[in-house]
Amino acid sequence: MSSVLLLFLLLLSWVNLGGCIRLGNGGYEEWRMGSATYVKESLGHPLNDGGGACGYGDLDIFRYGRYTAGVSGALFGRGSACGGCYEVRCVNHVLWCLRGSPTVVVTATDFCAPNLGLSDDYGGWCNFPKEHFEMSEAAFLRVAKAKADIVPVQFRRVSCDRAGGMRFTITGGTSFLQVLITNVAADGEVAAVKVKGSRTGWIPMGRNWGQNWQCDADLRGQPLSFEVAGGRGTTVTAYSVAPPDWMFAQTFEGKQLVE
């Protein structure tokens, strides 16, 4: 009897949450309606060849794999969505949705640009305020059939499951430092960054584009520490991520965000 009662309570708690997914910080996010298309891998789209508005480069090298998506401006937030994870499922279309509406988790790695010359329901899918996912082919085929054009979807933000720590790829020049931050867990987003050398205090960095952060300082010859704030307020400090003899274009691994 006790096991039956326990099962009932678990089911009841799930219903009371409206079928929401629990994020690592204790919050819940409802399913929202949107739309999705996909780009064939043979077309060499930025989602597949390592380009994209988030600045990640080769998505396999930076551990984002094949389940990725470009998101419309309503979701992109001038780059703040880069690295965020979304659970997506195709709904309300018996011809194109896979049976049972399976879900796939994708990482936002690009911006889906608007096409103001076309209507929102025919080519202008990423026009504001549409919430749209331009998915990689591999991700799309987990939820819908390849013959589909545009499909209605439900989506929600979920916590990102990442292996290892955050990765810091350092670029820049003699008068400025730029760092690309990848492989971020928790909500996957980066909201603020500070950097510290052995001869400086903490220096705030600004978002240059995507997940490239920059400050006007010459920190060559100093070990580098980073303070990273996630999109939901979680902060982690990674000390001495890069040694004093670091060089531009090198990538270093530090602590991970934990919710």
Image (tube, rainbow, N blue to C red):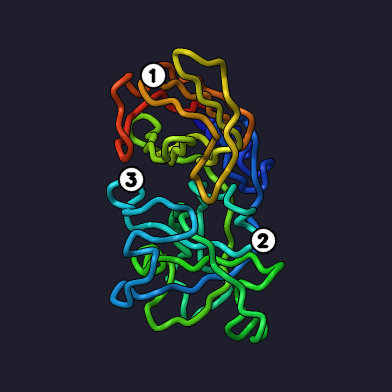
Q: Residue at the far front: name it.
A: 174
Q: Quadrant of residue 75?
A: bottom right
- The answer to whether mark 1 and mark 3 are in CB contact below 8 A is no
Mark pair 1, 3: CA separation: 25 Å
Whole-percent x and y of residue 64?
36, 49
How many numbered dots are placed on residues in this image? 3
Residue drawn 62% across and 54% down? 78
Q: Mark 2: which secondary structure?
A: helix
* Residue at point 35%, 24% (across, down): 242
Secondary structure at numbered mark 3: loop
Q: Nearer the viewer, mark 1 or mark 2?
A: 1
**Which residue type does callout 2 highlight?**
Ala
**Residue highlighted by disc 1:** 222
Q: Residue at x 28, y 47 (%)?
A: 61
Q: Position of residue 253 (x, y in %)?
A: 34, 29
Q: Earlier in the sequence, mark 1 or mark 2?
A: 2
Q: Mark 1 vs mark 3: which is more N-terminal?
A: 3
Q: Amino acid at mark 3?
A: Phe
The residue carrying mark 3 is: 62
Q: Nearer the viewer, mark 1 or mark 3?
A: 1
**Residue behind mark 2:** 74
Q: Classify residue 62 by image quadrant.
A: top left
Give the amino acid at mark 1: Gln
Give the image location of residue 13, x and y in percent: 63, 36
State how far apart marks 1 and 2 are (Cα). 40 Å
